[in-house]
Amino acid sequence: MKSNSLFMLSLVLCCSMRALAAKTDTVATTSVAMKKSIKAVVILPDSYSTGKEYPVVYLLHGYGGNYADWVIKAKGVEQAADRLNMIIVCPDGGIGSWYWDSKKDSTFKYETYVATELVNFIDGKYKTIKSRKGRAITGLSMGGHGALYLSFRHQDVFGAAGSMSGGVDIRPFPNNWDMSKRLGTYAENPEAWEKNTVINLLHLLTPNSLSLIIDCGVDDFFYRVNENLHQQLVLRNIPHDYITRPGAHNWQYWTNAVQYQLLFFSNYFGTAAK
């Protein structure tokens, strides 16, 4: 009888855990701008079937990564969707897109894709809060740059944004990560580099126009450019959360950092809804 009871209890707990598990889908989206299908992971909270509308966090991958990175390499993201009652969308940003609309390569129009085409797809398919008050965007490394770049330029779409170990100033790295393929070389096209680096887009912000969180480990090769961005935001009186702690440019750091970012966005969604 005792072993039977233990078995039944284990079965109930197992079923309960499954019932409360987020649903993770891989969906095919269409980019008209790039004339191709692009995959994205969509994480729905366990409460999704209740009929309410949910806020959405767009979570961008880094250079060399893909749409599946966050669910494969950062364990705990699905549980955060459950705990915080939000939808999380992880799109594919291509190899070295930096989430720009490239003027050098017409097959790379990832600004249009993420900020317009993907948002419209998600809003059309899922029960979402269809306003900037219910949308946030963040990412790691190249995706950290992309999240700030897109949110600064599309404040009508996103109300909150973040960056983890983001390449927030591309100019110190002119030979890295395929950036010259999207912008041309720094030597030949300095204006394009100046116009497409996050730190030079702060004129687009006014205090509290975006809710911002920036996070970078002190051992990261992007630490200095993040420090510079932080100081420039302070100088311009732009409120933001800025987190630094021991850590390098790796998944151990981002698995921890993303939990802070998602909680920050959850707090933003709660405040914006009032």
Image (cartoon, rainbow, N blue to C red):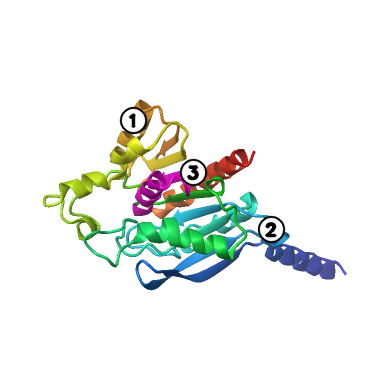
Mark 1 burial class by Cα count in 10 Å: few <14, some 14-19, many 20+: few
* Residue range of the region highlighted in magenta in the rendering: 142-164
Q: Earlier in the sequence, mark 1 or mark 3?
A: 3
Residue, disc 2 = 47
Which label lies toward us, 3 or 2? Answer: 3
* Cβ atoms under marks 2 and 1 closer than 8 Å: no
Please state the total of marks drawn on the protein image: 3
Occupied quadrant, residue 65: bottom left
As measured in the structure, the alpha-carbon distance from the residue carrying label 1 to the one carrying label 3 is 19 Å
Q: Is residue 222 left or right of residue 240?
A: left
**Tag 2's secondary structure?**
loop
Say which amino acid is labelled 2: Ser
Residue, disc 1 = 231
Q: Earlier in the sequence, mark 2 or mark 1?
A: 2
Residue lying farthest to the left in this orientation: 187
Residue 173 appears anywhere in the view: no
Residue at left 15%, top 51%? Answer: 189
